[in-house]
Amino acid sequence: WKLLTKKGELRYCVTSLKLYPDKGILEGSFIDITDRKLSENKWHTLFEILPVGVSVLDSNRRISDFNQKLATILGITKEGLQNESYKQRKYLRSDNSMMQPDDFPSSIALKEQRMVKNVEIGVVKEGGDIIWTNVNAAPLPFSDAICVIVTSDITERKQTEETLRESEEKFRTVFDHSIVGKSITYIDGSMSVNPAFCKMLGYTKEELTNKKWQVITYPDDIELSQKYVVQMLSGEKDFACFTKRYIKKDGSIVWVDMHTVLQKDNEGKPLYYISTAVDITERIHSEQLLRESEEIFKSFLEHSPIHIYIKDENLRSVKLSKNFEPFFSKPMNEILRRNMNELFPSEHAEKMDAEDKIILNQGKEVTIEKEFNGRSYLSIKFPIKIDEKTKYLAGFTIDITERKLADEKIKALLAEKEIILKEVHHRIKNNMSTIKSLLMLQAKNSKEPAAIDTLNDAGNRIQSMMVLYDKLYQSPNFNEM
């Protein structure tokens, strides 16, 4: 009952009535419960402002009181809580196995008369969605209120934990199965590495786990690596990319491209470095060989006694030997990347371009001899193919002016020698004929048979010499005689 006093105050009362029919009397009593009612109102107010769900069980273990937050967390109406429709739902442990009623925190708290804390329970709603809760229960020393239950919604936290777990699993899968070296380096220098990192350096995982990064880093690169570590620790850099060397187990050197990121906790405290190391040893060696090759070729162009050139598809010079500078009376930067019209007279340049286009189109080597500025030159031109496609034209040009002059002089000398040889032949042949005639005349006038035989024999010898000499003179090759 609500009663209004003479002073206008509102009082709450409980009435007890007893009827005496034989006497025609109705006896009643009133108990003032205003203070208890006000206390209950305060209790309900506290219930409603709490950020967690709160419920109270009566002696029959039914929910006798609860706040709106509990209904919101469980996604159920007040009527559903009052008529116990929640008991039709399924409940899960943290490992997703089914939870029985005897395992509920309230059951354990009442059975063992102790407080039960932080029990994770998954509530399976009618549609199949799961609400994850953290439940605390404690027994109460009242006849009409035997247990209080506090329920917190941890669904978002569980989803975050699951997402984090999946992320960690994905990271571990990528980490372990990556084809390039990956490592987690802790602040003290110790490391956790993947199989690819072990294979790259020739160590087992156990051997590298017990080593610090400084031990396997090439001594000259420790300072460089430490510089990036300090920059990331100070916040100057979020990550670092650089090239360094590691020492393999067999003592050889491996070059790597490093990409390192510093991981921090929620408060910004450094935890560890995640690094990716890509083996670039072959690339470094190839670059070194390329530099050496370029230096050799450069030196060759610097000191070549003949003119060497390479032209691109547009017939512009891309490489020239040093001796082209005095040839054109220009420095190298004024003759490189120029076409022939910029370097030679137009008539000469057009002929040269026409020849070069034929070589590029046909892909064949060509030898050309021509005159320029009163001098003679011999050029050997050939295509350079890249991936079976002609990309460049290269050539050697030799100044053959002196050689041609020498050839002409030799020809003149040979002609002069031929005249002299003819004259000598004529004179020798005449002299031999004269000697033979004299011998034959002397033999004819001689009376001594022995003398005649000797003179005839000498004459025959002279005749043989004349025949042999004549054949030698007329033969183009003495070896055929």
Image (spheres, helix red, strand yellow):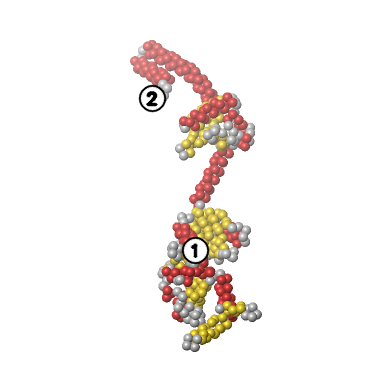
Q: Quadrant of the N terminus?
A: bottom right
Which quadrant would residue 13 be assigned to in this image? bottom right
- Please report whichever mark, 1 or 2, sits nearer to the chain's N-terminal start: 1
Q: Position of residue 369 (x, y in %)?
A: 52, 27
Judge by depth and name the residue closer to the eye, 339 or 196: 196
Q: Is residue 261 visible?
A: yes
Query: Which amino acid type corresponds to the residue marked 1 in the rendered image?
Result: Gln
Q: Is residue 233 above or below residue 145?
A: above
Which quadrant would residue 296 be assigned to in this image? top right
Foreground disc of the pair 1, 2: 1
Q: Is residue 323 visible?
A: no
> Which residue appears at 45% of the width and 80% of the height?
111
Q: In the drawing, what numbered circle is on residue 159? A: 1
Q: Which residue is mark 2?
A: 480
The number of numbered badges drawn on the structure is 2
> Which residue appears at 49% of the width and 66% of the height?
75
Which quadrant would residue 438 be assigned to in this image? top left
Judge by depth and name the residue closer to the eye, 6 or 300: 6
- The residue lying furthest to the right in this view is 7
Q: Position of residue 386 (x, y in %)?
A: 48, 39
Residue 49 lies left or right of residue 432; in this view the side is: right
Q: Is residue 199 above or below residue 99?
A: above
> Which residue appears at 55% of the width and 61% of the height?
263
**Could you say whether the residue bearing mark 2 is in a helix, strand or loop?**
helix
Query: Which amino acid type corresponds to the residue marked 2 in the rendered image?
Result: Glu
Q: Position of residue 377 (x, y in %)?
A: 55, 28
Q: Quadrant of the C terminus?
A: top left
Judge by depth and name the residue closer to the eye, 111 or 329: 111
